[in-house]
Amino acid sequence: MDVKKYFSSEQIENIGENVDQIISLDVSGRQLIKILYSSVRQRSGRPLCLLAAEKLQEHIGHGDFVLISCGMIIYPYDTLAETDGPLGAASLARALQLGLNAKVVILTDSAAIDMTKATCRGANLNVTDLETVKRTERTVTVRGFPIDEDEAKKEAKIMLDDLRPKAIIAIERRGRNEKGVYHALPKGRNMNYVEAKIVSLYDEAKERGILTIGIGDGGNEIGWGIISDVIKEKIPFGDKCGCGCGGGIGDVTSVDVMVAATVSNWGAYGVAACLSMLLNKPEIMHDAKIESRMLRECIDAGGIDGALCLPEPKVDGLPEEIHIAVVNLLHEITRAGFGYADHLLK
């Protein structure tokens, strides 16, 4: 579908700018996003969510596989993961499925499988096994990944050989620093002992020329290699972490497109919103009711708010109402055009 029948190139770019403004609004006053967004934007040159959506539209066809990784176990817990990540993964999986007829596999830590499955069902997605996804439409699957580095590398090769995905997307998925250490915020504790080594997929994907996209909000997630120098210089614990490894919290993984957001879920929502605009399919972007259902299903299945470390319907310390407002704004930005009443133009 030629979106330029509905929007000019200038309008499309302006919509992308507005989407990026919403998903990078520093509502919580955390201040990291000001540094992260401006630095990535300077190197990318265009609205980040729009750029990611364009790349997905370009690379993915009917029946193609897309791998989405999410999930972040919260220090000091070994089995509790946060609400940021699964909602973004479910939202973007929904948009890719309904918009591009993609087949989606979501990868996470074993401890986060149940909450991620519940979140996907909250997004009105059919969750099933991989073999069913291969032979049917409109189904997704959620799987774990190895913690051991060598096993992870082997699994990455097997999975890419089998599925031949057209894109791999990380949403609030912890990456590794130059020393190979995966860090928890805020101080940078070593999480290698519990972290599924999903970065192996991105290493292998880059060698095979598969589209890679990262979405993050803190500097320690997959994809921040694009501005690793900035993170070392300007982000707290970017040059010296709390675990003593000497490498800082910054991820060094390289991806094709990096989306910086105040909340990683919002970055995924922004990409889904831009994709809905490019395809002229507003229905593929989830609505306020689905946002609320996803969040509550995630919490009920074991998720916790990553800032407060409590099973409350919040993400990064922000209440449900804020996330609903972001979803509503993204819908309005990508489907509405300003116009005066006809009689005022006569």
Image (cartoon, helix red, strand yellow):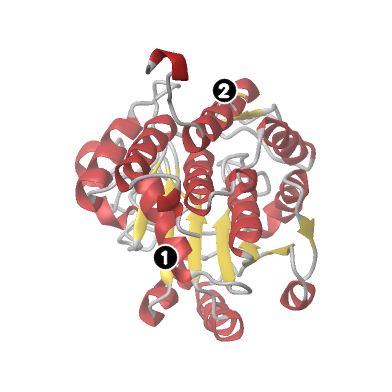
Q: Nearer the viewer, residue 22 or 6?
A: 6
Cα distance in 3D space between marks 1 and 2: 29 Å
Mark 2 closeness class: few <14, some 14–19, many ≥20 residues within 10 Å: few
Residue 102 location in percent, x, y?
A: 62, 67
Q: Nearer the viewer, residue 141 or 276?
A: 276
Mark 1 closeness class: few <14, some 14–19, many ≥20 residues within 10 Å: many
Residue at image coords 58%, 51%: 92
Q: Is 231 placed left or right of 105 in the picture?
A: left
Residue at image coords 64%, 65%: 101
Residue at image coords 65%, 41%: 286
Q: Amino acid at mark 1?
A: Thr
Number of numbered discs: 2
Q: Is 239 placed left or right of 322 in the picture?
A: left
Can residue 221 be seen? Answer: no
Q: Is 283 placed left or right of 299 in the picture?
A: left
Residue 342 location in percent, x, y?
A: 46, 20
The answer to whether residue 278 is above or below residue 135 is above
Q: Is 269 placed left or right of 6 in the picture?
A: right
The mark found on residue 212 in the picture is 1
Can residue 165 be seen? Answer: yes
- Name the image quarter holding residue 288: top right
Tag 2 residue? 322
- Dot 1 or dot 2: first in sequence order is 1
Residue at image coords 65%, 60%: 97
